Amino acid sequence: MVTPETLAELVEGERPMEAEAIQDADFDCPECGENVISVGYMPSITEFVTAYKCQECDWADDDRDE
């Protein structure tokens, strides 16, 4: 079972300081059309990020300004 921390780690590349509960993102994956889930987490003390991950393929993204 995927925990909020492991989901955030999949997207971020390292374990976050803290993570919120996993939620349905209410949109479909732009690559395969399947369901996307989201998790909010703190990678550092001064940053909060919401990450999105497809449940069926490798697609992932976050809400950071690039």
Image (cartoon, rainbow, N blue to C red):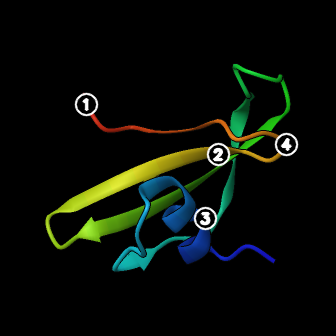
Instruction: Name the residue that disc number 3 marks.
Output: 7
Instruction: Name the residue that disc number 4 marks.
Output: 56
Distance (Cα) linking label 4 and label 1: 25 Å
State which tag comes first along the sequence, 4 or 3.
Answer: 3
Q: Residue 35: x percent and y percent?
A: 82, 38
Distance (Cα) linking label 4 and label 3: 14 Å
- Nearer mark to the viewer, of 4 and 1: 4
43 or 14: which is nearer to us? 14
Instruction: Name the residue that disc number 1 marks.
Output: 65
Kind of element beneath mark 2: strand
Q: Amino acid at mark 2?
A: Lys
Give left or right: position of 39 versus 16. right
Kind of element beneath mark 4: loop
Kind of element beneath mark 3: helix
State which tag comes first along the sequence, 3 or 2.
Answer: 3
Measuring 51% from the left and 53% from the top, which residue is drawn there?
11
Instruction: Name the residue that disc number 2 marks.
Output: 53
Q: Amino acid at mark 1?
A: Asp
Q: Residue 66: x percent and y percent?
A: 25, 28
State which tag comes first along the sequence, 4 or 1.
Answer: 4
Q: Residue 20: x percent and y percent?
A: 51, 71
Distance (Cα) linking label 3 and label 1: 20 Å
Q: Amino acid at mark 4?
A: Glu
Which quarter of the figure has residue 28?
top right
- Please state, as top left, top right, bottom left or bottom right, where the N terminus lies in the image: bottom right
CB under 8 Å between callouts 3 and 2?
yes
Measuring 50% from the left and 49% from the top, which residue is drawn there?
51
